[in-house]
Each structure stands twice: as C-alpha cells, then as structure tokens.
Amino acid sequence: MSVHIYASPEELAGAAADYITACIEDSGRPSTLGLAGGSTPRATYRHLAKRDINWADVTMWLGDERWVPHDHPESNTLMAREALADTVVARLVAPDTAFGEPEAAAALYSRVLSGIFYDGRPDLVLLGLGDDGHTASLFPGTDALDADDGLYLANWVEQKDTWRLTASLPLLWSSRELVFLIQGETKARVVAEIIDNGRTYPAQRVAAGADSVRWMLDEAAASLLRSIPR
C-alpha cells in the first residue's frame, strides 16, 4: 500500500491522470481501465482526455453502475462518456441497464468482462470512497459483501432503496492494481479509520485483499491521518 497526498483537488486530478497514463504506457500491451463514478474521477477523466495515450489499445469498463438508463443524470456510464470516452478512441464496455432484471444484467456483463481481461485479471482499477466506507457499489451490510464468486453482481442497497450493479470483491482483489481517488473533508474520518486503524469498511476489505493499492488523496481527505508523515 502507498499513500500520496496532494494540496488541492485539481492537483490530485492531474497527478492521477499522470499516473494512469504512465501505467498504460508501461504495460506494453492492450490494457483495461476500470472506471469509478462520482465527482473526483470526473476531474481526472477530463485531464486524461488531454493526454497523449494510444487509446486504441485501451478498453474501459465500469466498477459499478446505478440501475438507471444510460442517459439518466445519475448514470456512471453517461458521466464516463461525457468526461472521457466520447473524446478519445478507447472502447468503453458498460453494463446494459435496460436488460431485463438487475441479476440478468450483471450476469451478462460478467460474461462480457471475462473476455476483455488479459490473463483473466483487470489491470488498473479506479475506485472512490463514500463517507459510509463503501466503494464501487459495495455498501455496508449488503449481500454482495458475502459473495465469493462472480465478476459482477446485482446488489440491493437498502439505504438507497435501489439496485446497484457492482464489481465483486473477488474481481477487485484479482486486479493488478487498485487506485483510490478521494477528495474532501467529508471523507477524512473514514480515510483515517481505514488507513490508520484498519476498520473493516467495504473499502478496507477491498484494499486488504488486493495485490497493490495506491491511495491518492487531497489534503482535506487526508487531514485526520496520523500514520502518514508529511
């Protein structure tokens, strides 16, 4: 695990784009990039869209999606297209939220994902963090946290009164690298509880089981950390 702290959200977004660019360039082969939803990744994607990357060798996919149409304002697919995918030549593979029931859509997307990963493993996966400790759509107390197989799952989130589609714990654990992008004072408490104290939020479980984890934080999100000198 490594932790990297930046003075502002804009510095975080630029540094994240630089790091993602380097990872893609250094892979030496077609790469997969797992995308996170939310406002923090959006700024990173806008930076990425300006980078000189061989996007034709990149396949992007979504770490989670809301059970809404792709043109809905809350759709992660819509955000990813507007901020990045529609401005570069990379392929974006998204779950079909118009496909019957959530479980069927998750099963179909699992089959699609199984065909895009090199050696069966995702490369770089971007993740966010909720102030309740969730990441992707792995929320505290939800059934997806107990699933021990499957790439993508339909997850009923009681606290949101809605279905979400999400990468499973085993899929995220199999990734070559996870990068958490986190900004804002509202995230500071949970960041400190995970990094300093190892409290078992969903995001902590994801990080604990992964081969390589990089935390990229702005100063506000890192403000309560005690174990990271700066």
Image (cartoon, helix red, strand yellow):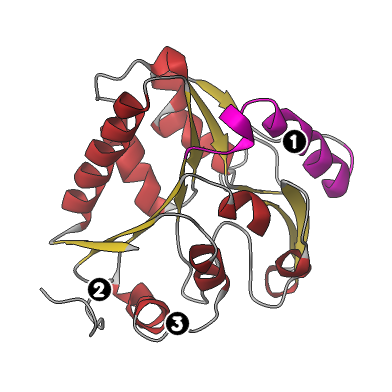
- Image coords of residue 89 (percent x, y): 44, 14
The vertical placement of 68 against 27, above or below, is below
Q: Residues within 10 Å of mark 2 (few under 14, many from 20)?
A: many
First-in-chain label (2 vs 1):
1
Quick one: 119 or 44, which is closer to the camera?
119
Q: Position of residue 110 (x, y in %)?
A: 75, 38
Tell me if residue 42 is in the magenta stretch.
Answer: no
Image side of residue 13 versus residue 158, left or right: left
Q: Quadrant of the C terminus?
A: bottom left
User: What residue appears at the point 40 percent right and 86 percent down from the top-left corner?
Assistant: 197
Q: Residue at x 30, y 68 (%)?
A: 184
Q: Label 2, label 1: how many angstroms apart (C-alpha)?
A: 35 Å
| Residue where numbered disc 3 is placed | 198
Residue 137 occupies quadrant: bottom right
| In magenta stretch: residue 101 | yes
Q: Position of residue 177 (x, y in %)?
A: 43, 47
Q: Report the magenta stretch's main SS.
A: helix
Q: Which residue is mark 1?
A: 109
Residue 60 in view, yes or no: yes
Q: Amino acid at mark 1?
A: Tyr
Viewer-proximal residue among 21 and 121: 121
Relative horizontal placement of residue 32, taking residue 120 as reference (left or right): left
What span is in magenta? 100-123
Q: Distance from label 3 to label 2 (Cα)?
A: 15 Å
Q: Looking at numbered disc 2 in the image, what kind of residue is underneath it?
A: Ala
